[in-house]
Amino acid sequence: MQIDPANWHDRPGFSKLLDALQPDSGTTRIVGGAVRDWLLKLPVSDIDLATSLTPPQVMAALNTAGIRVVPTGLAHGTVTAVTGNTPYEITTLRRDIATYGRHAEVAFTDDWAEDAARRDFTINALYADPRSGAIIDFFTGIDDLAARRVRFIGEPVERIAEDHLRILRFFRFSARFAPELDAAGLAACTARANDLMALSRERIRDELLKLLALPAPVPTIAAMLQHAILKPVLPEVDAVRISSLEALILAEAKAGVEGDGLRRLAALLPEDLALAGEISGRLKMSNAEKTRLIHASTRAPVPKDPHALAYAIGPDATLDRLLLTADPRATHWAGPLRSYARPRLPISGKDLIAMGLAPGPAVSRRLVEVEQRWIAAGFPTDRNRVMVMARDVLGVA
């Protein structure tokens, strides 16, 4: 089997990169997700390369060719080439010497089978000759792709012990590619679920949100909850809320809104603001993500004019609320909220002082009163009209 090399011939700077790495001698191949997705006729964003050249040899070859090189992970054999304004990750073939659940000591090798054996799943251990497009498959990954099966390379329990993140990756890749979970993989993930506690919360957050954002995550999430996979790190996510996730996904589809992992996580959590704040901290979310999750944790109805709520909590959080409450207006408001720009009150505290209000804390309080009237009036941009509101609040002519 092979891939048509035309798939990558027009990639910016890729031909120059290949010439520098001399793939005709068999030193360099395309590897991993790009090969998998081309075989499945899916869009390919990034191309990663594996090579038998050592990192110093790779950097020397790139420098000779005038290609910018960034030593992004020299200890693990990875450099990034930037050519045609496009980054390409290049990693020297490796074998594991020792593993520590997430980190590994590696040695470089020129054995392609050894490199393939340390990868997680058979469908991710595919290589392609960049000149001919011929596929190199050491672990029947092509057969597993055809069968839509996500299967660990080697003994699943051992592979998870090497890298605990593979538990979440197993479910994410299964949700994307497999209609059913591989029984051996599921059993191993269930047995090793407590290993998730050793992972950084950032890793857990990233994998979970990627999984939830997939087009059809419900069967996989239901299986994870049934087998208590998330219990060690997110015990608050309960199987009884699967119906809420299903309802949200239907609402997103009806409104033509892309699935969002953070919004879908909110659907799986109890309606508890304090808990949402605690979980966002536990998962090391950004301040913006934390704020969104907290706002999404209440199912209070959206006011008649969603612009007022968007002004208060932001357009993303407002759309979250519309979708999570199955508000039929979500279909109409999805577009306007995506392009929403927060308006500015046309007057300031200086204007109130000019009207005779004494400087001090009262200025801020009265300005808030004016702002509330301005919001209720639909955010008029006419400054004179807002000045009239201000005079009325202050009781001046």
Image: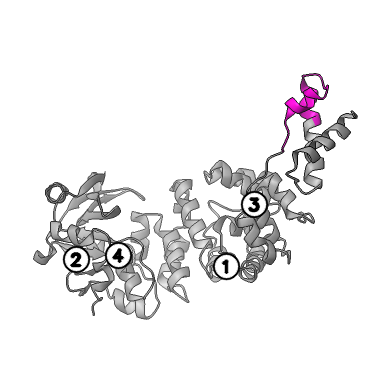
**Could you say which quadrant of the image residue 70 lies in?**
top left
Q: How are the colours assigned in the image?
A: one colour
Badge 2 marks a residue whose secondary structure is: helix
Vertical placement of residue 364 versus 3, above or below: above
The residue sitting at 36% across, 65% down in the picture is 156
| Residue 354 magenta-highlighted | yes
Q: Are marks 4 and 2 in contact (CB under 8 Å)?
A: no
Mark 1 or 3: in front is 3
Q: Position of residue 74 (x, y in %)?
A: 23, 45
Residue span colored magenta: 346-366
The residue sitting at 23% across, 54% down in the picture is 91
**How much space separates mark 2 and mark 3, taking CA atoms?**
50 Å
**How much space separates mark 4 and mark 2, taking CA atoms?**
14 Å
Left or right, 45 with respect to 270, comes to: left
Mark 1 or mark 4, which has the lower sequence index? 4
| Residue 283 magenta-highlighted | no
Residue 120's tag is none
Q: Label 4 belongs to which residue? A: 32
Q: Is residue 145 visible?
A: yes
Vertical placement of residue 62 versus 365, above or below: below
Mark 2 or mark 1, which has the lower sequence index? 2
**How much space separates mark 1 and mark 4, taking CA atoms?**
28 Å
Mark 3 or mark 4, which has the lower sequence index? 4
Left or right, 69 with respect to 205, comes to: left
Q: Label 2 belongs to which residue? A: 113
Badge 1 marks a residue whose secondary structure is: helix
Q: Label 3 belongs to which residue? A: 315
Left or right, 395 with respect to 178, comes to: right
Mark 2 or 3: in front is 3
Mark 4 or 2: in front is 4
The residue sitting at 36% across, 54% down in the picture is 163
